[in-house]
Amino acid sequence: MLHRPMGTERQAVLVTGSSSGIGAAIVRAFAAEGAYVAVTSTARSHAAGEALAREVGGVYLEADLGDPAAASDLVERAVEQLGGLDVLINNAATTAVIPHDDLDAADAEVWRRILDVNVIGTWQVTRAAVPHLRRSGAGQVITITSTSATRPTGSSIPYAVSKAALNHLTALLAKALGPEVRVNAIAPGLIETPWSADWGEAHEYVRREAALRRSGAPEDIAHACLLLSKTPYATGTVMTVDGGLSLL
Ligand SMILES: NC(=O)c1ccc[n+]([C@@H]2O[C@H](COP(=O)([O-])OP(=O)(O)OC[C@H]3O[C@@H](n4cnc5c(N)ncnc54)[C@H](OP(=O)(O)O)[C@@H]3O)[C@@H](O)[C@H]2O)c1
């Protein structure tokens, strides 16, 4: 178990869904700044999550955020292992790739799975984290949403709607939890991770059309996360980091 030395300036950071992609880059970025970090994933990526926790001198915790009890239990285990909680990064999410005009494919089961993990899972983790974040004195939440929250794009309609809910949740919680806890979000465009590995055409489109002519790297989002975390007057904001994709 890790315990923060008394009087330490080191932050305790929990990053959900951090065994790969954007979450893993966020873990590395905060660890490089000296934070104690908890890496999480489902059982599917247990080995990768453990390896990353070892690499950064943090801890690994398994939890499927589709299970409401597991979501709140995750926070208690993280606090126990890290010795407190200063920053919660809500990054875990799931999707289904469904063309938006195929309404029958987006059935109630698909909607429930996506909303359970992306919205209710995020809510449960955040709710459990708030008492600890208040105690921190500089507590904050950063949620990874998507540009599909505000544009008619994204891997499926249920996914885009779940991310729109998280953008609004960011505003609602920022108002409810200030001044003790800051709440912000980052809306990535297309980022090169295992999630988007098969989306060749989409990457081609971004390389050809978006202002910065490239898909994002996970480190681009991790960089934005660090920046927001170090911006003490920002709360309730959704920072778009998409290489100009939303300008199209
Ligand atoms: N890549 C993009 O283009 C892009 C664009 C906009 C927004 N985003 C957002 O960025 C975030 C990270 O995505 P990524 O691209 O880095 O994907 P990724 O590499 O596939 O990582 C997803 C992470 O979430 C975890 N996860 C999935 N379902 C979970 C569940 N039910 N409970 C707990 N953890 C779960 C995964 O763990 P397991 O492997 O164990 O499932 C993994 O650690 C997501 O919120 C996504 O919506 C991505």
Image (tube, rainbow, N blue to C red):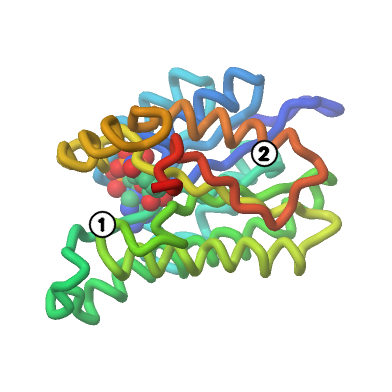
Tell me where residue 128 appears, x and y as whole percent.
Answer: 62, 62
Q: Quadrant of the N terminus?
A: top right
**Are the residues flagged by discs 1 and 2 in contact, CB closer than 8 Å?**
no
The residue where tag 1 is placed is: 155
Kind of residue sitting beneath label 1: Ser
Among numbered discs 1 and 2, the one appearing first in the sequence: 1
Disc 1: CA contacts within 10 A as few (<14), some (14-19) or many (>=20):
some
Alpha-carbon span between mark 1 and mark 2 = 26 Å
**Residue at x 58% of width, y 34% of height:** 224
**Residue nearest the observer in this picture, 216 or 128:** 216
Indicate if the residue with disc 2 has its beta carbon within 8 Å of ligand 1.
no
**Residue nearest the observer in this picture, 74 or 109:** 109
| Residue 126 versus residue 3 in the image, above or below | below
Tell me where residue 88 appears, x and y as whole percent.
Answer: 61, 47
Q: Quadrant for residue 52, please give it.
A: top left
**Residue at x 48% of width, y 60% of height:** 71
Tell me where residue 122 appears, x and y as whole percent.
Answer: 50, 61
Residue 51 can be seen in this image:
yes
The residue where tag 2 is placed is: 228
Tell me where residue 44 appears, x and y as whole percent.
Answer: 24, 44
